[in-house]
Image (cartoon, rainbow, N blue to C red):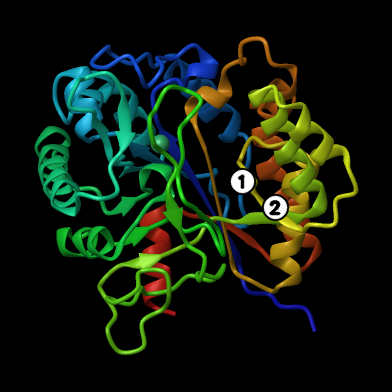
Amino acid sequence: MKSHRPLRLVIGCDTDPDRLDFGGIAFDRGTQPQTWAGLDRIPDLRSALDTIRDARGRAPAVTWFLRCDEQIRVTEGSYGAVLVRFSDLWKHLSDAGDEIGWHPHFWRLAKDGSTWFHEVDDEDFQTRMLEESFAAFEADLGFAPTSVRMGWDYHNNRSMQTLARLGVHIDLSALPFQSFAGSYNDRGASFAGCFDWSTSGSLPYRPSRLDYRIPAVSDEISIMELPQNLLQSSFSAFLSEARGAVRDRSPRRLIRALGPNRIVASTTVKACSPPFLFRSMVRDVLRREEDWIATYFHPDELLARKGSLINDLIHRLSYFSTNVRSVVRIAERHGRPVEFVTATEAADLLAHE
Ligand SMILES: [Zn+2]
């Protein structure tokens, strides 16, 4: 029997500065200010999305997770520098029905000032930085953020508890069943990318105080976790290996990508990924009879990448609206009306389920 429950789509943006591949600054440039050309593409994206409607007649809502953290304080002059400098843009987006959330990274400058690294050992630094940034966010924008996506998808028990204590309603950092120990980063960071969601599934949950990765039994903390949607397929394994091989100029990786690929791997399907990948992810969600799709992107993915045909094929502005339209179309075919919601609206809906 077909379900008529709504399928809800949450689109998030990790509103980071331009990355190196898109003309940004490498992580070994110390205190050098960032570049933000990707933000210039946002009004065009907003206009394109405004031509689409969900089952209730609402245009796609985007939750803009803004950077307000130690790296922004050091490179841009204050925790809230990006909130203030682009305040007209954030107001324009809020007025359009979007949400302004928070995207704190745990970047920390090495003592000799040479390179940025992902601080995952010093939880006192993390906690203090979250508290100070949160206060600056509220002071500079006039309201406190209620939704978060963490930099590098990273969390630990204390960072999750800190967000809950600060009053954040929902976190969207989980990547179901994924973990990565972190490594040297080819964009100049001495260490980055560490996260552990190896025991988290794809369904929303209230995290356990003792283990942020799993639903609480009796020790829940007052925050909701909504995992991002991944596509699981051998083709996605090929694609991520092939991209890595090109990036690392590694013939061995390329051979591995082209070889018989029996491994079923997961890849993050972003809002501007190729439509055939995005459609597969949507069908997977509907097949599992789930009620949520959470996806995200970065502003620089709306720019052309320098000298990389493969990336230009993967991230295209035109894909974005095609993908959002396909959610509506495919879900309707399954008798599921689509509702576009912001992250905090998702938290409210989940709280009443
Ligand atoms: Zn980020």
The Cα–Cα distance between marks 2 and 1, rounded to whole angstroms, is 8 Å
In the rendered structure, the answer to whether residue 181 lies left or right of residue 266 reads left
Along the line of sight, the residue nearer the viewer: 38 or 56: 38
| Residue 273 x %, y % | 68, 37
**Amino acid type, label 2:** Val
Label 2: which residue? 328
Label 1: which residue? 53
| Residue 197 x %, y % | 48, 62
Q: Is residue 215 above or below residue 232?
A: below
Please say whether residue 173 is visible from this viewpoint.
no
Along the line of sight, the residue nearer the viewer: 46 or 294: 294
Tag 1 secondary structure: loop
Q: Are marks 2 and 1 in contact (CB under 8 Å)?
A: yes
Q: Is residue 91 above or below residue 233?
A: above
| Residues packed near mark 2 inside 10 Å, few (<14), some (14 to 19) or many (20 plus) | many
Quadrant of residue 49 in the image? top right
Quadrant of residue 9 in the image? bottom right
Numbered badge on residue 140: none
